[in-house]
Image (cartoon, grey):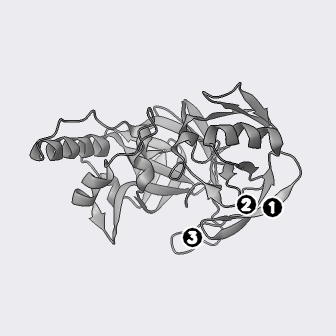
Amino acid sequence: MKLASIHFYPVKSTAGHEIHEAEVQPWGLAGDRRYLITDERGGILTAREEPRLLACLARVDGDTLMLTGPHAEPLRVTPDSSISTVSVWGTPVELTDCGDDAAGWLSELAGQPVRLKWLDDPTRRPVNPAYGRPEDRVSLADGYPLLLTSTASLARLNEWIAEGAVERGEEVPEPLPMHRFRPNVVVDGIGTPFAEDEWKRVRIGEVYFRVSKGCARCVLTTIDTATYTKGKEPIRTLARHRRWDGKVWFGINLIPDGPGRIAQGDSITIL
């Protein structure tokens, strides 16, 4: 098995991009999901509520962030000194505001007043203690430092989607791309689809990870990233084949046991 690809999302719920290698830190890939967008009430705004956020591509450039999108010229963002507390899935976290220029740029894209916030100190947010250790931390990802998916599992899911379409007398859709599931690391060469469900610990290159839990999937996976419209897949098919505990599942969450670097092509070892 090998590491097929690495995916990086500087701003939560915006477009990601593939990178060749990455530094693994205790709270996730270096720079991954250190920014998020809030609405006018101060709550988190994600692509679940506003799919147009997926049209924003953010790239880290030294100590600053560069935003690009279809609606305006690229914008270089530098956080200011204004701090506020934002509830990140129930955990209050102090975040730094990124200024009026970033707010205006993103508000135009989202079609509503928003602000961009930065997590300057990634040690502030603990992992859910039910699935981690007291010292485990996570940046602004939904719950855990990294998400792993496999090409074998996606291939099987796309087979199920095609089979379901045939049963309903519908046109077979194009296979879903992996970026719908917003992984950080994608594994190739697994012999059995969804074998990752049973993993407890894994080594990618020379970096060790614990598997905290499976990843319950939400409506974000149903958004077509080309049209920003919502459909029924893959939730409909996952509900048929991968539903338990009242949720549907695809991928596993990882917590690093220590820092290091990973790169495309690294070997994957199940421990």
Q: Are marks 3 and 1 in contact (CB under 8 Å)?
A: no
Q: Is residue 191 in sight in this rendering?
A: no
Q: Which residue is mark 2?
A: 123
Q: CA distance from mark 1 to mark 2?
A: 16 Å
Q: Is residue 264 left or right of residue 29?
A: left
In what quadrant of the picture does the N terminus appear? top left
Q: Where in the figure is residue 89, as x and y percent of width and height?
A: 59, 66
Based on the displayed image, in which of its 4 quarters is residue 154 positioned? top left
Q: Where in the figure is residue 133, as x and y percent of width and height?
A: 59, 70
Q: Amino acid at mark 1?
A: Ser
Q: Residue at x 29, y 46 (%)?
A: 153
Q: Residue at x 51, y 37 (%)?
A: 6
Q: Amino acid at mark 3?
A: Asn
Q: Nearer the viewer, residue 200 or 50?
A: 50
Mark found first going from the N terminus, 2 or 3 = 2
Q: Which residue is mark 3?
A: 128
Residue 84 is tagged as 1
Q: Residue at x 52, y 75 (%)?
A: 130
Based on the displayed image, in which of its 4 quarters is residue 11 positioned? top right
